Image (cartoon, rainbow, N blue to C red):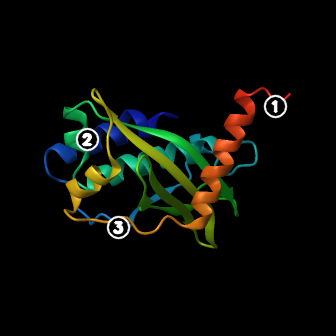
Amino acid sequence: MAHYINLVRVPALVVRSGLGMVPRMGLMETDRVGCRVLPWDIDFNLHLNNSRYLSYMDYGRIRLLARLGLLTNFFSRRHTGLVGSVDVTYRRSLNFGVPFTMHTRIACWDAKWIYIEQRFTGRQGLATHAWVKMLFRGPEGNLSPQAIAEAVQPGALSPTVPQRIADWNAAVKQTLHSIEAGHDR
């Protein structure tokens, strides 16, 4: 049961998307999906486990591709989405049995990455917030985020990359550089 999203929800979404049964949305709109914390989602504290948040977030991004009209085309062309980094802040617990809504949207993009914001809200408000940076790759190499945006909305321009995302990118680069240079020991 722990793989319900990967074995049931994602394949069903791919089939429905291929049949044109997934409602379309605009490039900068927010997708919302209602969920509930199920028995296989919880940890010893009886709340949504941190690893399950990431699984739900994967589903949210795949669903976003479907709602943007990109999913079927991506599969047929053997394109894949690769997560480069995730920054997650946990604010409140989502306890067993509680309904919640997952919000997923494209915030902006640059020459390499598409930045996606994902939020989980429950009865008490914001439970978790995450930034995800993704790139898309096909057999020919990395795909241009601008080309992906234009496939959904011709002439689309990215909103300005917020300073907090630029700072996050700089921190990730500095950490990776420090580790690769052997300065982490």
Amino acid on which the number 3 mark rests in the picture: Met
For the residue labelled by badge 2, is the local secondary structure a helix, a strand or a loop? Answer: helix
Q: Which of marks 3 and 1 is nearer the N terminus?
A: 3
For the residue labelled by badge 3, is the local secondary structure a helix, a strand or a loop? Answer: loop
* Quarter in which the C terminus is drawn: top right
Of labels 1 and 2, the one closer to you = 1
Crowding at mark 1 (Cα within 10 Å: few <14, some 14-19, many 20+): few
Amino acid on which the number 2 mark rests in the picture: Val
How far is the residue under mark 3 from the one under mark 1? 40 Å
| Residue designated by label 2 | 14
Q: Can you give x and y, in whole percent of width and height, for residue 112 in the image?
A: 42, 46
Crowding at mark 3 (Cα within 10 Å: few <14, some 14-19, many 20+): some
Q: Residue at x 26, y 30 (%)?
A: 78
Report if the CB atoms under discs 3 and 2 are less than 8 Å apart.
no
| Residue designated by label 1 | 183
Q: Is residue 95 visible?
A: no
User: Please, which residue is most extreme toward the left here?
Assistant: 19
Q: Earlier in the sequence, mark 1 or mark 2?
A: 2
Crowding at mark 2 (Cα within 10 Å: few <14, some 14-19, many 20+): some
Q: Can you give x and y, in whole percent of width and height, for residue 29 in the image?
A: 35, 68
Work out whether residue 117 or residue 158 is closer to the camera in this orientation and state it: 158
What label does residue 28 carry, if any? 3
User: Please, which residue is most extreme toward the front here?
Assistant: 181
Q: Quadrant of residue 43?
A: top right
Q: Can you give x and y, in whole percent of width and height, for residue 142 in the image?
A: 35, 36
Q: Which of marks 3 and 2 is nearer the N terminus?
A: 2
